[in-house]
Amino acid sequence: MRVLFVAPYVPSRIRVRPYEWVRALARQGARVHLVAVQPPEDQALADRSVLDACTAADVFPLGRWRTLANAAFALPTPLPIQAAYARHPAAEARIRELVDGGDVDVVHVEHLRGALLVPSPCPVPTVYDGVDCITRLFEQTVRLAPGLAQRSMARLDLGRTRRFESTLSRRFDRMIASSEAEARAFRALDPAADSAFVTALRNGVDLGRPPGPPADDGRTVLFAGKLSYHANEAAARRLAVDVMPRVWQRHPDARLVLAGKDPSPALQALAAPGRIEVTGYVEDMAATMERATVLAAPLVYAAGIQNKVLEAMARGVPVVTSASACAALEAVVGRDVVAADDDAQFAEAVGRLLEDRVYRDAVGAAGRSHVERHHDWDALARTLLGVYADARQAAERRRGLAAGAR
């Protein structure tokens, strides 16, 4: 199958879902032509290894001036600023050239930021990976984000995003989402859509690198994720300020590591020698995870499946996270992953894992087994190819109805 994969950023180990989709599709025999824009926040990103899996690739740098102009032009329109952010005339012209050229079987569109890069209507069947319902995320961000700017931006774009996401079935032939909860949120916004329009297709995890032998020191609590993302910042701050002081009461030698790209000055200010380390970008997050005793993700709000949780489970590291994150995983709570919601529960769960080696080894092993059964990218890619085939049938029906109406 010939797949035109359209992304609003270059897929990488940080942008893990599109990165693994491209690689897994290639392993399944698909010919993937990537068209991506590279936004200003990714200009220094050196990881372009995904290009090796593509039969062809076009990458268009997106300057800061262009993103600001895109936002300004979107303001007086009904379009979400998030959707307008990555618009790029040259990229859009290249996509139009490819879909008109007859050498594409299906177009895969990544994320809300990529939605406007593809012409609508498109002469080729389209599958939109909404990943997470941004309306649902913004509804939480307005109430719970740590910064006023983040809450204000979400409030500005919430109504536009809700209206746009309610019309996705008119722009695309089929859609996938990262969990059943996200799929339900999309269906609720667009109840008139075909019942088969949205498919829940969870994130996978790289299982090619088996976990090494436990290398933890029995005292390291890790939070991992892109720390510039507001939901991650809120969770990391909660862990450092509200949960860990309770842990330190029983385990004064415990240490907290906040690992991830672009921590804010507020997070960096939490660093304390011997107690809290804020690493910034980590080249090999898998190795960092394997040195941890427990991964703790006390989410204040979030959407979809948490990649940091899956990656820790794949490394055999026991995870404590919120009940909502556990539900998205469809894992057995207490066996594969530990659920906790309030600060006292989190501290109790983390403390037990710190002090009981047998227990944490059991949870770590069960977590690895769970992701092996349910989060294999190759198995997920085979399902995605089925969604592509369904999109082609839906596009044929759409064209037949349009022809009959003329």
Image (spheres, grey):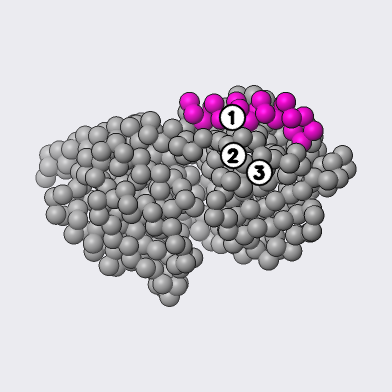
Please give the range of residues in magenta.
353-373
* Residue 72 pos. (x, y %): 44, 71
Query: Taking the image as drawn, is residue 207 in sight?
Result: yes
Q: Say which quarter of the image contains residue 350.
A: top right
Callout 1–callout 2 Cβ contact below 8 Å: yes
Q: Which mark is residue 367?
A: 1
Which residue occupies 51% across, 35% down? 210
Res 197 visible: no
Residue behind mark 2: 312
- Which of marks 3 and 2 precedes in the sequence? 3
Residue 332, compared with residue 1, is above or below; it is: above
Q: Which residue is outermost to the bottom?
A: 65
368 drawn magenta: yes
Q: Secondary structure at mark 2?
A: helix
- What secondary structure prevails in the magenta region? helix
Q: Quadrant of the N terminus?
A: top left
Reading the image, the residue beneath label 3 is: 291
Rendering quarter of residue 208: top left
Most distant residue in the right direction: 249
Q: Please state which of the two labelled residues, at mark 2 or mark 3, is closer to the viewer.
A: 3
Give the vertical position of 229 relative to 196 (above or below). below
Q: Is residue 72 magenta?
A: no
Question: The disc labelled 2 sits on which kind of residue?
Answer: Ala
Residue 374 x %, y % = 47, 28
**In 3D space, how far apart are the residues under numbered discs 1 and 3 (Cα atoms)?**
16 Å
Whole-percent x, y for residue 292 in the image: 67, 42
Question: Which residue type does callout 1 highlight?
Answer: Gly
Residue found 25% across the figure and 55% down from its top:
56
- Spatial CA distance of label 1 from label 2 is 8 Å
